[in-house]
Each structure stands twice: as C-alpha cells, then as structure tokens.
Image: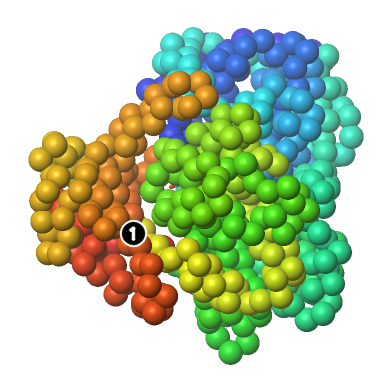
Amino acid sequence: MTIRTVATTPFDDQKPGTSGLRKKVPHFQRENYAQNFIQSIFDAAGPGAGQSLVIGGDGRFFNAEVVRIAIRMAAAHGYGRLIVGQNGILSTPAASNLIRQRKASGGLILSASHNPGGPEGDFGIKYNVANGGPAPEGVTDAIYRRTREITEYRIAEEEAPDLSALGEHRLGDTVVEIVDPVADYAALMETLFDFDKIAAAIAGGLTLRFDAMHAVTGPYAREILERRLGAPEGTVLNGVPSEDFGGGHPDPNVVWAAPLVDLMMGPTAPDFGAASDGDGDRNMILGRGIVVTPSDSLAVLAANAHLAPGYRRGIAGIARSMPTSAAADRVAKARGLGIYETPTGWKFFGNLLDAGKVTICGEESAGTGSDHVREKDGLWAVLLWLNILAEKKQSVAEIVKSHWAEFGRNYYQRHDYEEVDAKAANGLMESLRDRLASMSGQRFGSLVVQEADDFSYRDPVDGSVSTGQGVRIVFSGGSRVVFRLSGTGTVGATLRVYLERFEPRPDLHDLPVEEALAELIETADSIGEIGKRTGRSGPDVRT
Ligand code: VG1
Ligand code: CO
C-alpha cells in the first residue's frame, strides 16, 4: 500500500457541536474539509496500530464517498481492522453496538441525524469512543485543537474495496470487513425483548405502523418488525432509504411526521405508531388518538422496563437531559431510584451508564435508550413499548393516562425558533444571563421566580465540569422555562424554549397542552424578550 501525505491548511469552523461536526454538503465538499476533520480525529484518538475502527453512516448524500475516504485514511493511520456497514450504512445505535461487540477503539458515524439531506442538505461526522458512545468533551476539544493546527493528512493511494461486497478485504495490512448492518443489531434486540410475546400480540390483532421516513431504519424495521415479529408487510412506511430522505426532514415529530400523526388521529388508526429519524437514534411514539411526548415516554419506559426480559431485574437509575421534563424524576422518586440531570447531548450519559449508575436515559428531543449501547436508540424504544403493550394488554392511551394518575402529569412543550440571526440569539441569551442574579422573587402574572441559573454540570464519575448549558427559570410551584441555543444547526441560530408545568390533579390531566401552558408561554416571551429580539411572532416548530 502506498501512503500519500497531502499538505493542507486548517479550517476555523470545525468545532464539534452537540453531536459531531455538521455543515451543509457543499461546505463539507470543499477540498480537504472532510479529510482535515478525519485526520484530526485520528490524531486525537492516538495510534491505530492493532486497533479496530467501525465506519458507517445514515446513507445520506455524500455518505458513501466519505466512507471510502475514511477507509483509505484509516488504513494509512495503521488501523488493524475496519468494520464497515455494507454500502456504507449503519444506524447510529447499530454502530454503537458494533464498537462494543467487536471491541473497537472507536467509530466514525457519518450523519446529520434529523437534518435534511441531498446535495444542498446537511452532512456530519461524529467520533465515538471505545464504550460505543459519543466522544466526551475532553476528546472533542482535543479534536478541535488539532483542526486548528493541522498541516497534512495521510491517505492510502489505493481505492477502498467495493462497499457492497460482504466479507473481508485488504488495504495494505488493514483488514476491511464489510458487514451486514442489521444482523448484529437485530440479534441484540432479541436478547432484550420477548419477541415471542410481541409476535403473539401482533398475531392476536395488535396493529402498528412504523414510519422510517426514507431514512436508515427502513431495513432494520422491516427485518425486525415484519420478518422477525410477523407484522404484515406494509407495517413499515417509507422503508426504502434514499439519499435525500424523499426530499423531507427525517425528523420524527408532529410537524415532519404529520402523515403518521394524521393516521394515528383518524378513524383507521392502528393501535401503535412510531417513527425514527435520519440515523435511527430518535423515536416518536403514538397510540390511537394520542401522541406521547418524549419526556412522558421516558417516564413510562422507566416505570415499566421490568416487563421486558432485558430489564427484569429492575433498573439501576435514570438520567435525563436538563431540558427534559421531570416526569422521569417522579418515577425515580417513587421507586427509590437514582436520578441524574445532565447537559443536552448523549455524550453526557456515557459515564453514568459505564459506572452502572443508570440503566435508562432520555432526552426531550425524542431520544431514549439504555445501557445496551451508548447511543439513544429509536427501534429499541419502539420494541420496549411493544413489549409493554404485549404484557399489559392495555392501549397506549390507557397506559399513559394511568401513568399520569399515579405520578402526576408534567405538561410540556418545546418551542423552536429556527434560523434566527445569530447575533440576536446570542444577545437574547446574554441578556438573560445578565439578569439571572436579580430574577429571584420577580413576579410575572401569577408566577413568581423561585430560582434562576445557567445550568452547569459536574460529572459525578470523572469530575469534569461543563458550564453554560442553558438558562433555567423555575417558578414557585415547580413550573419552569428553559432557554438554550441549539448545537446541531447549520444555518444561523436556533433558539429552543422549553416549557413545563406539573399538575398533580387527575381531573386536570386532560387539558389541551397549549392551554395548560398558556401563562408560561406568555411569561417566557416577556422574560426572554423573544418577539422583540428575534422579530418573530411565534415559534417555527412546537414539539
Ligand atoms: C439536539 C437535541 C439533543 C440531541 C441532539 C443530537 O441538540 O436537542 O437533545 O442530543 O440534537 O441528536 P441541539 O443542540 O440542537 O438542541 V441527533 O438525533 O440530531 O444526533
Ligand atoms: Co439522530
């Protein structure tokens, strides 16, 4: 194998965000742009000799090309073995599983998740470490430092093997193993859930639809739901992955998965509905006539996980990201479990999972997962729900309503203001931070501020500290507004406003969410000066 050393100069915008580096495709296609970032990852990750590396992505436009570049660069870096999804495809949770099962030192996951794809869409690269999870901040900081000083990268002259050809190939001394993206993941799911029981429920009349949104989960869902669990063909909607996700946003929420929501609210609704995102780590859960918020889903799954074989001995604890509602906290309190509040992004759950402090984790952004991998996992959540439905023999709505009756209901909504002028968005956050100290005791209508802060987190396992993770304003009575800026967007800034109000009384659990949160929504606008500073009269997306 001939190794070519290519001179390059740094780009100043390769700082990884909440989940890796994400940019528009044409930006990523600039000469050496992807190569610089991959070399910086390898430099930060250390020598490749004798190590294995997992490589795959969500199949979006530019995926296969970067997989081939990554293979050639990894061979030049001396990796012993590359485990690559066939045709360059791996869902994020499947990649996490392969890293763990194959004891790889890490993995490159190519995805911009729920962001649109195609030649003008988004692309992304993320590095995961040996536990299968996203690189912690110490590693992403080191990668970023390398991107600022890089002078050259190394790449094999030879072409990468045919990505469709399963089996072992060689590139110099490096073994390139092309694997079936679905097989190991599906086998893992069979160890966690009672497939016989779910299959019997489906054979007995439980109906479902899964919307793969033309993204990576299509083949996974067809294998697991239709083939192994016997759901009829057609259960998986939009199951053929495409490079631009059929022109849509592969984002499983009420806005972008509206056709599924309409189906579930209509007269021909099946018992259960779900959707996943571009790279397969998010999930949306619906029942006939009901959309389950991700925060509620986390709480319901945590409360009922013991009904599935993989969690029969109970769970060790629960972790949720700070903006996620406190519904899970109520389950933890009632069951005497540990509960942890982390910054946004799955990388903060890794240490807690590795240390055995928690078993189940979740985020309000449709992410739920457990210690089976170190990423959130869309199909995992779907299967746990199905296992619970098969055991309880109740509808989704019945399960959610009895959950609220037992634990109380945390009314919740997230408002996103997208592509806001970055200066205006930063100004809004700065102004909030400046006023934090004087906020306590202030009255807004019937709401009195009890405490206000900028969330910071000290990792209880390694002691690392992450500051500036979002402004929290808590009112007496426990209602809460959180403001933060997204770290995954590629255009301008996205302001996220998270609204939450706890309601213990069962006779008040059926209010429309907007009504239950009306006063908080108004208060958030006036405290944050949202309209004034962004020029927007309302959010672009409410989830
Ligand atoms: C968003 C979500 C966050 C999630 C992240 C990656 O980040 O809010 O909860 O972990 O996306 O998910 P941000 O910084 O834009 O709020 V995925 O499925 O896009 O990898
Ligand atoms: Co995702």
| Front residue of this view, candidates 478 and 341 | 478
Q: Where residue 492 appears, x then y in whole percent?
A: 30, 44
Instruction: Check disc 1 and report the residue beneath it.
Output: 500
- Vertical order, 372 against 302 (above or below): above
- Answer whether residue 380 is visible to the viewer in this image: yes
Toward which corner of the image does residue 179 lie, by quadrant?
Answer: top right
For the point 34% across and 32% down, which residue is it? 456
The location of residue 264, given as percent across then percent down, is 57, 78
Disc 1 is placed on an element classified as strand
Q: Within the image, what quadrant is residue 396 found in?
A: bottom right
> Residue at point 63% right, 33% down?
356
Q: Amino acid at mark 1?
A: Glu
Looking at the image, residue 152 lies above or below residue 192: above
Residue 431 at x, y = what percent? 14, 40
Picture layout, residue 512 above or below residue 37? below
Going 70% across and 55% down the picture, which residue do you hit?
306
- Residue 88 showing in the rendered view: no
Quadrant where the C terminus sits is bottom left
The residue at label 1 has a CB less than 8 Å from ligand 1? no
Residue 166: x %, y % from top left: 87, 39
